[in-house]
Image (cartoon, helix red, strand yellow):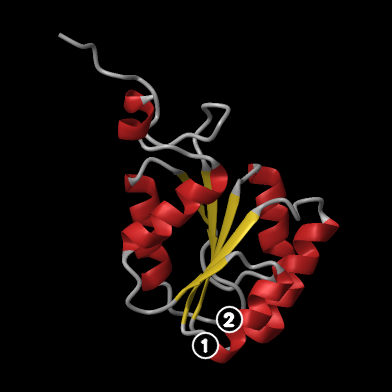
Amino acid sequence: MTTPSTESPMTDQSDQPVRILVAKPGLDGHDRGAKVMARAFRDAGFEVIYTGLFQTPEMIANAALQEDVDVVGLSILSGAHMSLFPAIMTALANVGRADALVIAGGTIPAADVTKLKELGVAEIFGPGTRLQDAIEFVRQHTGAMSEAARDAS
């Protein structure tokens, strides 16, 4: 008989839970997708900090610093991604958090994806993306392993 594991099911290489900041930049008032993603990340074992609506780039960067997150997830539906995301990447660098993995989701045209990736956004998850795909991307890019993978090693 095995004893139940007390480990978090989602940890990085230092066995600390992966911390994700989910943020809604700008004046975009639609947050259902961000809340769905936050819950999916939480259910996958990540520690999730949700900033709420109407966040400025500086507010997002300061939250990333204060919360010591591994990942910054941006959700946008307003179409202002080409204005806000560069400002967010600059703000993250200004507070010393250029090391955070930045991912984004929302209605971002395919023509803008390459430009955003050149800015340092690691991945864009558009409408219809499976939640598991975003979770797996974070696992792969933070060194996090699932409990099954840990048990097998």
* Callout 1: SS: helix
Task: Between residue 50 and residue 102, name the one nearer to us.
Answer: 102
Measured along the vertical axis of the image, is residue 111 above or below residue 69?
Answer: below
Which residue is outermost to the left? 1
Q: Are marks 1 and 2 in contact (CB under 8 Å)?
A: yes
Q: Position of residue 90 (x, y in %)?
A: 80, 67
Q: CA distance from mark 1 to mark 2?
A: 5 Å
Q: Quadrant of residue 128?
A: bottom left
Question: Which numbered disc covers residue 101?
Answer: none
Residue matched to label 2: 113
Residue 110 got which mark? 1
Asked whether, in this view, residue 11 is left or right of residue 7, the answer is right
Badge 1 amino acid? Ala
The location of residue 103, given as percent across then percent down, is 56, 64
Residue under the point 72% across and 55% down? 62
Question: Residue 88, located in which quarter of the rendered image?
Answer: bottom right
The answer to whether 15 is drawn above or below residue 65 in the figure is above
Q: Residue furthest top?
A: 1
Q: Nearer the viewer, residue 4 or 149?
A: 149
The quarter of the rendered structure image containing the N terminus is top left
The image quadrant where one finds the C terminus is top left
Question: Residue at the location (67% across, 82% down)?
Answer: 115
Count of numbered tags: 2
Q: Position of residue 148 (x, y in %)?
A: 30, 33
Task: Please tell me whether mark 2 sits on a helix, a strand or a loop.
Answer: helix
Q: Is residue 101 above or below residue 14?
A: below
- Residue 139 coordinates in the image, percent (x, y): 46, 47
Q: Amino acid at mark 2?
A: Val
